[in-house]
Image (cartoon, grey):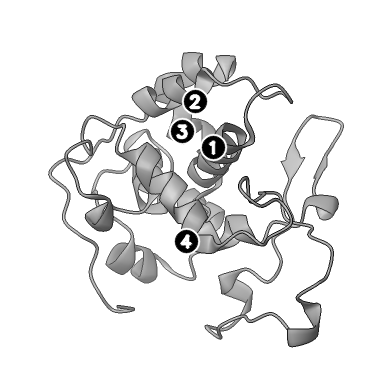
């Protein structure tokens, strides 16, 4: 529920190394099966930018760009923070519009991809973390929560984490996402820094 407290964790630090090593096995090329590229891209973006599955689902591919400094700029159509808590629904007449989403339905490419499918990718990959391997998928913490707390553990400031995650206040973060009381630039690097070798080869 909206006011539910975060599920308790048995430890503060969750090592993403096994997951990153697994993803590094898959080249980012046209020769890699689409399902693997979907999962790899979704996990890395969600972990590095604290994105929800619904955010990933609404990334507008044609609006994204890489600048001269090789920085990726994502365009997310009406993220949750800009909707004032209102549910976002497609217009009935827009069902047949050309797809502009980053992620593709690998079974039926012409069919829309569901947010629940993206969420499933992230949950399955999270179980590769030794700290979460025995946790049922239905009770797993969100990758957004794990990544933001990992950034704090690795020295990122709370202010930077709040900005990166678009949290409206530290109270919202404390009540619904924060699972560690450790505090400690580049927030994405803080999340992945323990496994920089793996991420460089991905």
Residue denoted by label 1: 44
Closer to the camera: disc 3 or disc 1? Answer: 1
The reply to whether callout 3 and callout 4 are in contact (CB within 8 Å) is no
The reply to whether callout 2 and callout 3 are in contact (CB within 8 Å) is no
58 to 41, vertically: above or below: below
Which quadrant of the figure contains the C terminus?
Answer: top right
The earlier-in-sequence mark between 3 and 4 is 4
The reply to whether callout 1 and callout 2 are in contact (CB within 8 Å) is yes
CA separation, marks 3 and 1? 13 Å
**Given the current orientation, which residue lies at the most extreme left position?**
10
The disc label shown at residue 116, or none: 4
The reply to whether callout 3 and callout 1 are in contact (CB within 8 Å) is no
The earlier-in-sequence mark between 1 and 2 is 2
Closer to the camera: disc 2 or disc 3? Answer: 2
How crowded is the residue under tag 2: few (<14 C-alpha within 10 Å), some, or many (20+)?
many
Q: Position of residue 102 (x, y in %)?
A: 71, 49
The earlier-in-sequence mark between 3 and 1 is 1
Could you tell whether 52 is left or right of 17 in the image?
Answer: right
**Given the current orientation, which residue lies at the most extreme front position?**
108
Could you tell whether 67 is left or right of 51 in the image?
Answer: right
Q: What is the secondary structure assignment of the residue under circle 4?
A: helix
How crowded is the residue under tag 1: few (<14 C-alpha within 10 Å), some, or many (20+)?
many
């Amino acid at each position: 529920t909206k006011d539910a407290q975060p599920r308790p964790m048995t430890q503060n630090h969750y090592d993403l190394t096994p997951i990153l090593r697994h993803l590094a096995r898959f080249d980012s090329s046209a020769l890699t099966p689409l399902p693997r590229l979907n999962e790899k891209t979704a996990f890395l973006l969600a972990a590095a930018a604290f994105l929800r599955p619904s955010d990933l689902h609404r990334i507008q591919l044609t609006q994204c760009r890489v600048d001269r400094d090789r920085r990726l700029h994502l365009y997310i159509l009406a993220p949750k923070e800009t909707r004032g808590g209102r549910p976002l629904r497609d217009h009935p007449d827009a069902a047949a519009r050309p797809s502009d989403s980053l992620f593709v339905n690998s079974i039926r490419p012409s069919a829309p991809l569901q947010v629940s499918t993206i969420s499933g990718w992230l949950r399955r990959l999270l179980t590769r973390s030794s700290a979460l391997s025995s946790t049922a998928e239905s009770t797993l913490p969100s990758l957004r929560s794990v990544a933001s707390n990992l950034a704090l553990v690795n020295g990122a400031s709370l202010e930077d984490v709040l900005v990166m995650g678009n949290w409206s206040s530290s109270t919202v973060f404390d009540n619904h996402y924060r699972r560690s009381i450790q505090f400690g630039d580049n927030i994405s690097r803080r999340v992945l820094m323990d496994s920089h070798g793996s991420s460089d080869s991905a």
